[in-house]
Image (tube, rainbow, N blue to C red):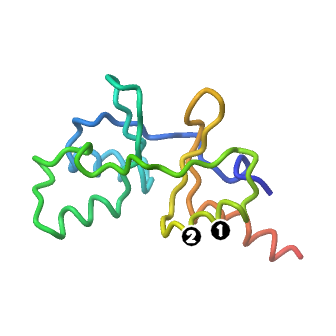
Amino acid sequence: MFVRDAMSTAILTIGPAHTLRQAARLMSARRVGSAVVQDGDSGGFGILTERDILDAIAIGRDPDLETADAHTTRDVVFAAPTWTLEEAAETMTRGNFRHLVVLDDHGPVGIVSVRDIIRCWVPARLAA
């Protein structure tokens, strides 16, 4: 099975000026654990996860004042749609993270999470 089989193609994209509260509300409404943060000026992007928001609040940051940009991971590890789920899981385990942005030649096409991988593996294992 491949990343393209497990990934979510409904990518939540936010801007760097979104506050952490705004990001959290959007993530909660979409029931996702991450958002791609796209910087319109530079054309670059990163990822903001629920863990990033939690860590910021835990150290006393105000979610109404802190921006996504200040907590975005910029050195993102990307997956290709053609990676196997094993490759994605190994990469997540080595990097100690739970989300991979999936890229093709044109940019982000999806997000794959540990939960997405488990959803694919469990039915396959039960059928065996």
Residue furthest to the right: 128
Front-lying residue, 36 or 43: 43
- Residue in the image at 38% along x and 33% along y: 38
- Residue in the image at 65% along x and 68% along y: 90
Query: Which three-letter amino acid code belongs to the residue tagged 2?
Result: Arg
Q: Determine which residue is flagged by label 1.
A: 90
Disc 1 secondary structure class = helix
Disc 2 secondary structure class = helix
**Residue 96 spot, x, y in % from top left:** 49, 70
Crowding near pointer 2: few (<14 within 10 Å), some, many (20+)? few
Q: Determine which residue is flagged by label 2.
A: 94
Query: Which three-letter amino acid code belongs to the residue tagged 1?
Result: Glu
Quadrant of the snapshot with the C terminus: bottom right
Q: Quadrant of residue 43?
A: top left
Crowding near pointer 1: few (<14 within 10 Å), some, many (20+)? few
Distance of label 1 from label 2 (alpha carbons): 6 Å
